[in-house]
């Protein structure tokens, strides 16, 4: 029987992505720029939460947004309409953003003028969890209409995220969404994950989200040795 040679293409791709993500993370840390990778299913409220955040915090921090989408530019146009720099990444069918894509997007931004970059990843709960973007923190949004069983179906994204945002809490009343079951499932996968409840539509819980994000940005910048370098 002839020898069979096995080439682990996927592992090589992930390893190379991790190396480039590490370079991105080191460069942003050198500059004191906090980057958040925001992930979720389509329709969970990523864009609505980002827009609300920009309106509330843009006088306190200098933001930019990197938008990932298979084709459309609708979300990037909404961000730009708020006076915030935006870079649209058209993935051409790819279901996630990866480190090389983020590196290309960063090359289009004036990094010296930024405190925080928010990545709005492509909408799904599978592929974005596998690819490190170089972000300092990862957050996943789960909306109430999606159901409380998502940690059972998509465990990786809850395992790797620092924050779980439960959005559209105004739908809780009258629904069969089991909040305590969701908490237990998420914490079993990731005992360190922080959980916030909010509604972008009503504004309930938004202050807790803003407090979390502002605290992360400030802590990141205070952790710089000698302060950020904006060359």
Image: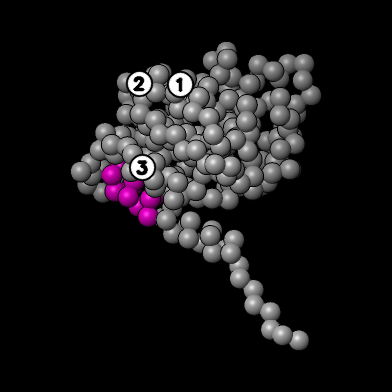
Residue 169 in the image, given as x and y percentages of width and height? 65, 20
Q: Residue at x 50, y 24 (%)?
A: 74
Q: Earlier in the sequence, mark 3 or mark 2?
A: 2
Residue 154 occupies which quadrant of the picture? top right
Using a 10 Å C-alpha cutoff, classify the residue at mark 1 as few (fewer than 14 neighbours), some (14 to 19) or many (20 or more).
Answer: some
Magenta residues, start to end: 23-33
Q: Position of residue 12 (x, y in %)?
A: 54, 64
x%, y% of residue 175? 77, 20
Quadrant in the picture for the C terminus: top left
* Residue lying furthest top: 202
Instruction: For the N terminus, give its image quadrant.
Output: bottom right
- The verdict on residue 30 being magenta is yes
SS at badge 1: helix
Q: Residue at x 44, y 23 (%)?
A: 77
Residue at the spot of label 1 = 78
Q: Which label belongs to residue 43? A: none
């Amino acid at each position: 029987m002839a020898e069979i040679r096995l080439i682990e293409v996927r592992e090589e791709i992930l390893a190379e992505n991790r190396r480039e993500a590490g370079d991105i993370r080191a460069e942003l840390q050198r500059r004191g720029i906090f980057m958040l990778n925001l992930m979720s299913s389509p329709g969970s409220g990523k864009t609505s939460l980002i827009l609300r955040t920009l309106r509330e915090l843009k006088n306190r921090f200098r933001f930019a947004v990197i938008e990932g989408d298979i084709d459309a530019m609708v979300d990037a146009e909404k961000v730009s309409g708020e006076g915030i720099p935006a870079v649209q990444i058209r993935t051409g069918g790819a279901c996630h953003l990866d480190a090389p894509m983020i590196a290309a997007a960063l090359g289009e931004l004036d990094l010296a003028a930024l405190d925080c970059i928010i990545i709005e990843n492509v909408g799904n709960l599978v592929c974005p969890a596998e690819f490190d973007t170089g972000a300092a923190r990862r957050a996943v949004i789960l909306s109430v209409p999606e159901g409380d069983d998502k940690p059972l179906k998509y465990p990786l994204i809850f395992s790797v995220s620092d924050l779980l945002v439960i959005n559209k809490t105004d739908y809780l009343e009258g629904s069969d969404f089991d909040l305590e079951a969701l908490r237990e499932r998420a914490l079993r996968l990731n005992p360190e994950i922080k959980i916030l409840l909010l509604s972008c539509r009503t504004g309930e819980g938004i202050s807790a989200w803003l407090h979390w994000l502002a605290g992360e940005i400030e802590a990141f910048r205070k952790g710089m040795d000698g302060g950020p370098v904006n060359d």
